[in-house]
Amino acid sequence: MVKYDTQLDATFTALAHPVRRAMLVRLGQGEATVGELAQPLDLSPGAVTKHLKMLERAHLISRSKNAQWRPCRLEQKPLVSASQWIDEQRAIGEARLQRLEDYLHELQKTEKGKKR
């Protein structure tokens, strides 16, 4: 049975859009206001807000209240979880390839033995 991880699903869904990835790259440099995130993107304020809400729902960012400012901050935990999942899948794939390679080497040895 397939086990679903809703947090992992939300993380990959949020990472699927290039604008949200660009926002995360910017936040990797430090906190930023909505205006600072929107400035290089050439998007309407409403579109920026929608992307930020998606990132918040995925727990990839958090926003604090500082007077009238609401700076955004990158949250590492969901990214670490996604990276671990990717590493696990890579290890599984590499193990399968290694078993295939071992099997092919055994076949070659068997074929060489038959030709002698």
Image: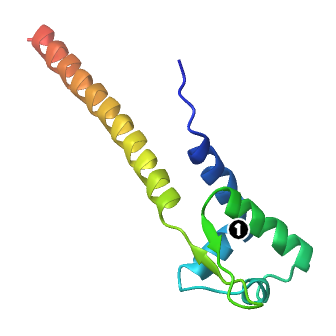
Q: Is residue 90 above or below residue 48?
A: above
On the image, the x and y values in percent for residue 24 come to 61, 73
Amino acid on which disc 1 is placed: Arg
Q: Toward the viewer: 113 or 81?
A: 81
Left or right for 48, reference 112 = right
Q: Which residue is mark 1?
A: 20
Residue at point 69%, 82% (across, down): 65
Q: Toward the viewer: 92 or 15?
A: 15
Looking at the rendered structure, the secondary structure element under dot 1 is helix
Hey, which residue is sitting farthest front in the picture?
67
On the image, the x and y values in percent for residue 10 come to 65, 49
Quadrant location of the C terminus in the rendered image: top left
On the image, the x and y values in percent for residue 88 come to 38, 42
On the image, the x and y values in percent for residue 43 come to 87, 79
Instruction: Check the image and tell me how it is coloured.
Output: rainbow
Q: Is residue 112 above or below residue 64?
A: above
Q: In which quadrant of the rendered view does residue 54 lie?
A: bottom right
Q: Toward the viewer: 52 or 22?
A: 52
Residue at point 59%, 80% (across, down): 27
Label 1, residues with CA under 10 Å away: few <14, some 14-19, many ≥20: many
Q: In which quadrant of the rendered view does residue 21 lie?
A: bottom right
Residue at point 79%, 83% (across, down): 38
How many numbered discs?
A: 1
Q: Is residue 43 above or below residue 75?
A: below
